[in-house]
Image (cartoon, rainbow, N blue to C red):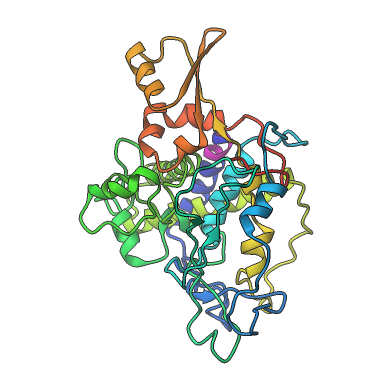
Amino acid sequence: MVRFLLAVGLSLAIAATATAAPSGTRSFDGSGNNVAHPTWGAAGQPYRRIAAPAYADGRSAMASGPNARYLSNRIFNDANQNLFSENGISQWGWAWGQFIDHDMGLRDESSGGAANIGFDPGDPLESFDNELGSIGFDRTPAAPGTGVTNPRQQVNTLSSFLDASQIYGTDGQRRQWLLAPDGASLLTSGGYLPRASAKPNAPVMDLFGAQQGRPGSAVVAGDVRANENMALTALHTLFVREHNRIVAALPRSLGAGQRYDIARRVVGAEVQYITYTQFLPTLGVRLGTYTGYHADVNPTLTNEFATVGFRAHSMVHGEFEPSFPEGTFSQARLDAFARQGIEVEHEDGRVVLVISLSLAFGNPDLLQAVGLGPFLASLGEVQYKNDEQIDN
């Protein structure tokens, strides 16, 4: 997939160069896609709805129901069994799904009020400890002007389009911070994503696990969730490198801004091309032939799609297994991996690092220690079956 990506990128970059700087560059926040309806699909707009809202009071109060933790433990529990993709889909399936999900939708992450989920330590299917008696959970805040006399709505802080916003960001402050000194490339550190400590006034990033105590160690990207797990961080890193590769291949006679725009245009096209020609068909989604732009269609993401229709969490594998020739790492390095909780296995002249998903959360340091190429290669392992179980 990586080789394919680079080949497509090169051909698209050549095509873009032939027409010099792109005219009518796509907006960063998704606005202006539709001349008659410039806010359709733009960041900061409420999610659309397909079905009518079902609030307890018709406006805002959450409907009651069985405890969510109790239900999930019984419907999706994966105790003592793993069910793999019946179609042999690799971990690239869920990794790409999460990557493009973070290009299309992100609720307002500020708290709209606590709605904690009760935790029962006596549940025979419960395998975790919890001394608080509940799992912290916050509601999404109401979109302005909703939830009082009319049904509560929620805001999508991203554009609804596949436009590589997770690489570039949707607001000017984040975009400017991510820009390298040459004005065309994206900022990197040794070929990896920059850390929040690299420059003053780093944009906000979501922090995971131990990162909450050392926010300067978090990597910074166009989307706030780039630290969530190593696969996601790796894909962000790959496409930042791809942007910079395209910039380096363009003639210096073009201005820095022109080279940035061309590279962004190509990267956005690559994301779309991979999604529609590889990702969706592989997952069994067959779309009709494209018939052209329909100005009467509102592309704003729906609540149903964002919360139910495009949830690939059940496909996430519980571990990553990058493999290396024996001798790649010193014994001291292997011992250091083991102290972190990584299982070190020796198989047929190769060293396999078994990295549990829990260790992969908020751990860009580990991605650099393993290496981008070997880690991406490890995603070739078969993923779990969709909608069957959720790994602990």
Give the residue drawn at x 72%, y 75%.
51
Highlighted range, magenta: 3-7
Which is nearer the eye, 141 or 46? 141
Q: Is residue 15 above or below residue 373?
A: below
Q: Residue furthest bottom?
A: 149
- Residue appearing at x 39%, y 55% in the figure: 206
Please tell me how many numbered marks the rendered image carries.
0
| Residue beneath the point at 57% across and 55% down | 101
Is residue 283 toward the left or the right of residue 235 in the image?
A: right
Q: Nearer the viewer, residue 191 or 312?
A: 312
The residue furthest left is 200
Q: Is residue 113 above or below residue 129?
A: below
Q: Residue 124 at what x, y percent from top left?
A: 65, 42
Residue 163 in the image, given as x and y percentages of width and height: 52, 59
- From the viewer's perspective, is residue 371 above or below residue 138? above
Image side of residue 245 versus residue 392, left or right: left
Q: Position of residue 317 (x, y in %)?
A: 60, 37
Determine the main secondary structure of the stretch shown in magenta. helix
Q: Position of residue 32 (x, y in %)?
A: 51, 76
Which residue corresponds to the image point at 65% horizontal and 57% vertical from the top-left? 310
- Asked if residue 4 lies in the magenta stretch, the reply is yes
Quadrant where the image shows the C terminus: top right
